[in-house]
Image (cartoon, rainbow, N blue to C red):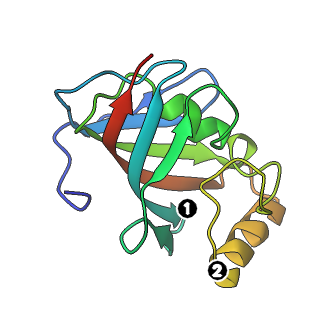
Amino acid sequence: PLDQEPVVSKFEKLPSGTQIADLSIGRGPEIQEGSRVLLDYVFRRADGYFVESSEKKDPFGFVVGKGEAIPGLDEGVRGMKQGGTRRIVVPIKNSYTCGVKNGCPGPIPSEFGPRRQIERQMNRVDPYNYFFFEVSAVKVVNR
């Protein structure tokens, strides 16, 4: 499901600069402020280089709007429905501004290599640099 060709290929640019494109529309509850979500994800650098995925671990869980996910991801999942898949292009300024240490917004890779890749990208002086996520909403709970 995470490597299927897109159904909708046009990206929508959000006010922050984050861009989103739905690959498939889910049929479950819609993600909104305060939703508790579980996401399967594939995370890549702007050059397409693989950083990490949730394939061999638990999905990434967070509450939308609570600062538990990097800002671009928190904003980019809003409006998705459970079961849907979306591509999210996150500009560096909307990503790991806190760093990759424990306690910072995630998803935070557990291994040194992926953490180091993120740190290197954050230190690059390139206004067009970004991170690329492909996420699938596994579970959405609204209160």
Looking at the figure, which quarter contains the N terminus?
A: bottom left
In this view of the protein, can residue 97 be seen by the observer? yes
Q: Amino acid at mark 2?
A: Glu
What residue is at 17 percent from the left and 54 percent from the top? 5
Q: Is residue 99 above or below residue 86?
A: below
Q: Is residue 65 above or below residue 94?
A: above
The residue that mark 1 highlights is: 46
Which label lies toward us, 2 or 1?
A: 2
What residue is at 66 percent from the left and 55 percent from the top? 129
In the rendered image, residue 31, in percent from the top left (x then y), is placed at 40, 24
CA neighbours of label 1 inside 10 A, class few (<14), some (14 to 19), many (20+): some
Evaluate if marks 2 and 1 touch, with contact meaning CB atoms under 8 Å apart: no
Label 2 or label 1, whichever comes before in sequence order: 1
CA neighbours of label 2 inside 10 A, class few (<14), some (14 to 19), many (20+): few
In the rendered image, residue 56, in percent from the top left (x then y), is placed at 38, 75
- Front-lying residue, 107 or 50: 107
The residue that mark 2 highlights is: 111
Q: Amino acid at mark 1?
A: Ala
What residue is at 50 percent from the left and 65 percent from the top? 44
How far is disc 2 from disc 1 in space, using C-alphas? 20 Å
- Front-lying residue, 20 or 112: 112
Q: Is residue 15 above or below residue 92?
A: above
In the rendered image, residue 82, in percent from the top left (x then y), is placed at 27, 33
